[in-house]
Amino acid sequence: MTRNDLFLAILVMAIWGFNFSMIKMGITEVHPLLATAARFTLASFLPSFLFDARMWLGATYSVTV
């Protein structure tokens, strides 16, 4: 397993662990719609950052429709 694979595996575990803590907090303390909005916001932030990082690093890619 390469270092990159290990990092990605740890990242997935951290995201899943955070999801369980958000569910617990949502059940006990926070309004369910607010907790869901926070989870979806965080879940959409990471992929958008990764796609933008490819552009910042100078990777070339094309989008076909």
Image (spheres, rainbow, N blue to C red):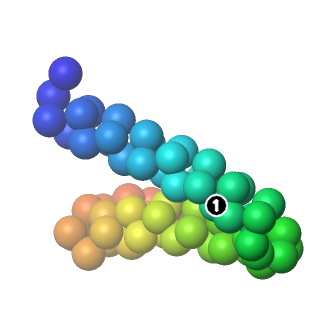
Residue drawn 51% across the image and 47% down it: 17
Residue 44 in view: no
In percent of width and height, residue 47 lies at 49, 61
In percent of width and height, residue 57 lies at 21, 69
In percent of width and height, residue 3 lies at 14, 35
Q: Residue furthest front?
A: 28
Hey, what amino acid is under mark 1?
A: Met
**Residue placed under numbered mark 1 in the picture:** 22
Q: Is residue 51 left or right of residue 31?
A: left
| Above or below: residue 24 compared with residue 36 | above
Q: Residues within 10 Å of mark 1 (few under 14, many from 20)?
A: some
> Which quadrant: the N terminus?
top left
How many numbered marks does the figure carry?
1
Q: Residue furthest top?
A: 1
Which quadrant of the figure has residue 60? bottom left
> Which quadrant: the C terminus?
bottom right
Residue drawn 15% across the image and 28% down it: 2
Which quadrant of the figure has residue 27? bottom right
Residue 11 in view: yes
Local secondary structure at mark 1: helix
| Above or below: residue 5 compared with residue 40 | above
Residue situated in front as seen by the camera: 8 or 31: 31
Q: Is residue 61 left or right of residue 22?
A: left
Residue situated in front as seen by the camera: 64 or 6: 6
Q: Residue furthest left?
A: 3
Residue drawn 59% across the image and 55% down it: 21
In percent of width and height, residue 31 lies at 83, 76
Residue situated in front as seen by the camera: 23 or 52: 23
Residue drawn 26% across the image and 75% down it: 56
Q: Is residue 33 left or right of residue 53?
A: right
Q: Is residue 51 left or right of residue 57?
A: right
